[in-house]
Image (cartoon, rainbow, N blue to C red):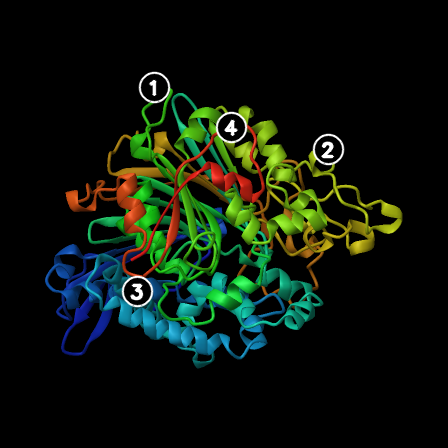
Amino acid sequence: MTPFVASADGDFQYIDVRYNATQNKFSPTQKGVNSTFGPVAASVSTNFTFYVNGWDIVVASGNDEFMSASEENRLIGYRAAGYGEGYLNYVRIYQNYVNSFNGSNGVTDMLLSSPEIVPWIDRHMMYLKNRSLVGDDIGRVIGGLLALMDGLAEGYADANTDATQSLNTTQFFWLSFQAEVGDIMTAYSTEEDVKMWKLFPTLDMRRNSRHCSALIRVLPTDVFFAHDTWSSFNSMMRQYKTYTFENRSVTMSGYPGVVHSIDDWYMTSNRLAVTETTNGVYNESLFREFVKDGTNTISEFLRVMVANFLAYDSPSWVKYFSTENSGTYNNQWMVFDMKKFTPNTGVLPADTFWVAEQLPGSEYPYGVTAADLTAHLNSEAHWASYNIPYFPNVYDVSGNWQQEQQFGNFFSYTNYSRAEIFRRDYLNVSDLDSMKAMMRYNNFKHDPLSLISNCKAATNGTCDPKFSAMLTIASRGDLNPPGGEAQYGVNYQFLGLRDHCATDTKIATWSKMMNNTSSNAFTSVIINGPTTDQQPIFSWDTSPFATNTDIIRVGLPNTYNFGFEEFSTVVPAAIIPLASSSSSNHDVAIGLGVAGAVVVVVILAVLVGKTRKTTRDQSEQMNLVSESV
């Protein structure tokens, strides 16, 4: 049949994906149309509204009846869902692939920079295939996600008729793995390589860049769970995506052809809100020591999706995520269990909110450090995250402590601009509109907290300009004038004119996840594009990048002036785990090592206060438990 072509005016397509066992092939048919080709294995819809409101809406669901017939059918259901997604979205997928991989800021340059990266990924994919054959829940979900990517390649190939635009399964894996490639690049680097890369700012920023602002605000009658993605301007081809398999679903902000969020921001059918901000790891020796192998670990993006599908509560999410840590794409993860919040009670119960920070390795002080930080929310009524590690061991071992000593407050957990802005302004967040304003905030020319703090290397010790549009909640790298160290000081690569900004805002709330009119639906509030609250609207043709041919922007609108949108998702009811899967603190501490001989540290008790030490001494005040299997 003729492939469906996405239009620019809100075209909606909804198909059943049928499977013929004799041919081992799929056929897309319009939803509800009878066919003798074979049974329905999955259903997929896309509302092509990217040019209307900034987001395509993609929903892919496996057919439970078909998938429950056998293990083979279960995997075919995942594959069929991928097929439908690839078939309907082939135009967007190719555009996103080109924008992500081509140009001087693209993944291709990273792949070519080190001949070891592609063989590493090949070895890793082989291990994942073998790992999926292990009969545990983690292996089953990995197998399903690999089948989903196989299906994406099949559906894309059937819809795309241009041989010059072909993409295979490995390339689809690369598309989902792209945030981890820089860490593989670093693993095979020498100190001389790192010095050379720093001469090419776009490549070095892609390898080791800061991503995202996040804020959790607890009010007497609601909880706000918000996230801004920080990324390149050409990453703003967005999809709001829901996957539903085996009576579990994951809803996320995402991208065409990618099987996880990348941002990352998720809502799960078990009513978990999940997000992260990337922690800078400046101690490159960690990657060389722990990441070179490529086998016996699971990609970060797959561990995240495994946890999203399997976890019932916050500690079990940490348990699944920590299994077989790859040490790639190292983030501060935040997991809030909306089921545990009760309005007007004043106190969140234990295990409502967990934070987990990842480093390469498996034994303390490396690996995954995690804690139940519900007490912090009860005390402070908010949690802010801004790309600097919270746990002292992670802060120290990652090299952030050394960076702070050398380069100043830009690397300080407590004195960095975003830390101070969140601390000053979080009390202003009293409803949804004020949370929107908080996450879109960028008044850099008039906010003293956006002042560049370390100008010792600038001309005459004075930065010119004095402020940076990167030193705020919703960054706008396009608004900074050109300049280097003489203008911006030692942190010029982070603070000057950059192809980098807060590209969106996503907000989940307790009231919209748990208190909807339908118990099996939740709603989010999201916006695509750079902030316009205190700053001008972003248009490519008037931006500093208008004539920059190294920034590829196929299929992107010229102007981003979208508003906030509310999107509702029908999801399965929360699934109560078996008694054997109970997630008490003790179970999590033991369970984190399961299936991968991984040793992680779980912090079961922390001192909660208004100040935080940034030295190794604080770890001695914590009850540290590590288990290995």
Q: Which residue is mark 2?
A: 448
Label 1 and label 2: CA atoms lie apart by: 37 Å
Q: Secondary structure at mark 1?
A: loop
Q: CA distance from mark 3 to mark 2?
A: 48 Å
For this orientation, the residue located farthest to the right is 460
Determine the secondary structure under disc 4. loop
The residue identified by callout 3 is: 148
Callout 1: few (<14), some (14-19), or many (20+) C-alpha neighbours within 10 Å? few
Q: Nearer the viewer, residue 233 or 487?
A: 487
Residue at the disc numbered 4: 609
Amino acid type at mark 3: Leu
Q: Is residue 478 above or below residue 89?
A: above
Amino acid under label 1? Thr
Report the Cα–Cα distance between label 1 and label 3: 42 Å
Residue occupying image coordinates x 52% and y 62% = 286
Which circle marks residue 345 in the picture?
A: 1
